Amino acid sequence: MKELTDRVRQTARKLLDGQQVDLVLGWEKGPEPFRSQPVFIREPEEAEQLVFDEFCIHNLSTFLLDYRDGQEKIGIFVKGCDSRGVVRLIEDNQFLRERLYIIGIGCPGMKDPLAAARAASGLNGTEENEGLAAKCRECMYPNPVLYDELIGDEQPPHLEGERFAQVKKLEGMSAEERWQFFSDMFSRCIRCYACRNVCVACNCRRCIFDETRPQWVGRETNLMDNIGYHVIRAMHVAGRCVECGECERVCPVGIPLMLLNRKLIKDVNELFGPYEASLKLEEEASPPLSVYRPDDPDNFL
């Protein structure tokens, strides 16, 4: 991907040299070959720090929330999932479109840095490090959906198999089997909130899970409090999830959070669709669960 790295650096340098933006958000190489991490640059000469390689897995759109109250013009490099995150923030009135210069990159799929770290450590010589990261193997939209400039070639979807295969398997379980499945799944949660903090759709200024007066959700790591946390969070992002898979990727205990998210994506599409979140920027657009229509399904009443 050396050619893409060169173009990323040239583009960033051009934007900063011409004072078209005040800062650029991209990726730089970390201390290990399998670590490419987010970086903010403000000077043209800093463009040499930027890279685009198979480990640029972080969704950069989340970091825009740190700048939502400022006035700076920001250049941001986006893959398909990052661009959907940008659309999410604009439609949620968290960021102004005119403050962004968006550089799109067709994503060939990223590798999992954690799998690479395990393989490099020598502690697990059988750890698979080849192929795409789990979240990229289920990507339907690798190309940016919103951009001011596009570099590189467009890429085909990376989806392996049927999109909702695991969801349908879950739906085929009995109520008792589903309860056992989710109990086992959420009992592992340590309530670190990494999934919330990395989620671009979790962009509330004050989060219900941080409130103490009143305290809406218990903070213990028992099963019921854990289930309450994950179900409430999943419902809050229902119809707004951009399927970047970052929540599941950063979970330190390996909870398959995208299974729950995809169940709601499937349901929202069937009940209120056809609908896919954040595929295009529409003025005053609202997700299905944020509006009311007289013909909405009401079988639960």
Image (cartoon, rainbow, N blue to C red):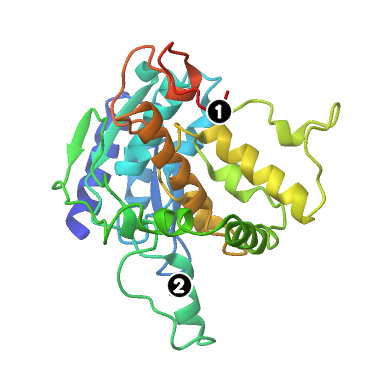
Q: Which residue is drawn at 79% across and 55% down?
A: 222
Residue 255: % across, % down: 57, 60
Residue 10 located left or right of residue 184:
left
Is residue 117 in view from this perspective? yes
Residue 115 got which mark?
2
Q: Is mark 2 on a helix, strand or loop?
A: helix
The residue pinned by badge 1 equals 300
Disc nearer the start of the sequence (2/1): 2
Query: Is the N terminus in the top left, top right, bottom left or bottom right quadrant?
Result: bottom left
Residue 86: % across, % down: 39, 31
Mark 2 crowdedness (10 Å alpha carbons): few <14, some 14-19, many ≥20: some
Q: Nearer the viewer, mark 2 or mark 1?
A: 1
Residue 57: % across, % down: 39, 54
> The disc labelled 2 sits on which kind of residue?
Ala
Residue 81 got which mark?
none
Residue 11 located left or right of residue 182:
left
Q: Residue 254 falls in which quadrant of the image?
A: bottom right
Residue nearer the viewer, 269 or 142 = 269
Q: Residue 282 falls in which quadrant of the image?
A: top left
Q: Residue at x 49, y 24 (%)?
A: 289
Residue closest to the far right: 213
Residue nearer the viewer, 272 or 206 = 272
Give the answer, above or below, for where 271 lies relative to 33: above
Give the answer, above or below, for where 217 lies relative to 223: above
Q: Which residue is drawn at 54% across and 44% down?
A: 198
Residue nearer the viewer, 99 or 10 = 99
